[in-house]
Image (tube, rainbow, N blue to C red):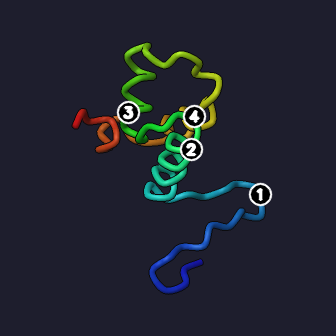
Amino acid sequence: MRRGRHRVTEMTTDGVLELTRDEIVRRIERGAQRRLHMSARELVQAYRSGRLEDPGLVADLIALASLLAESDPLFVPA
């Protein structure tokens, strides 16, 4: 459902939560900032390079990132 320019996330009747790419990135960004004081891109780079001290703290964010295509701009080094 869309209201204006913002999409309202809804669960489907079969219990599936549908998120757009922007919603996924926004959730990763908010979580990474709040928990580790880093950006979503920094989080993904630290995880992929093995520099993330305790990945379990952000396992949900890593799982969300895995839903994005490998070619997503989030995975491209800045």
Question: Alpha-carbon distance for marks 2 and 1?
Answer: 31 Å
Marks 4 and 1, how far apart at CA: 21 Å
Q: Where is the N terminus found, in terms of image quarters?
A: bottom right
Task: Name the secondary structure under disc 4.
Answer: helix
Q: Give the quadrant of residue 60.
A: top right
- The numbered mark, 3 or 2, whose residue comes first in the sequence reads 2
Count residues near mark 2 (Cα–Cα under 10 Å), then give few for <14, some for 14-19, many for 20+.
Answer: few
Q: Nearer the viewer, mark 3 or mark 1?
A: 3
- Element type at marker 3? helix
Q: Quadrant of the C terminus?
A: top left
Name the residue tied to disc 2.
34
- Pointer 1 residue: 14
The residue pinned by badge 3 equals 42
Amino acid type, mark 4: Ala
Residue type for callout 2: Arg
Residue at 49% over, 86% down: 4
64 or 11, which is in the foreground? 64
Q: CA distance from mark 3 to mark 1?
A: 34 Å
- Residues packed near mark 4 inside 10 Å, few (<14), some (14 to 19) or many (20 plus): few
Residue found farthest to the left: 78
Q: Residue 25, how many percent across, how many down?
A: 46, 50
Res 76 quadrant in image: top left
Disc 4 target residue: 63
* Residue 76 or residue 40, whichever sits in front: 40
Q: Residue at x 56, y 44 (%)?
A: 34
Left or right, residue 12 beside residue 40: right
Going from N to C along the chain, the mark reached first, 4 or 1, is 1
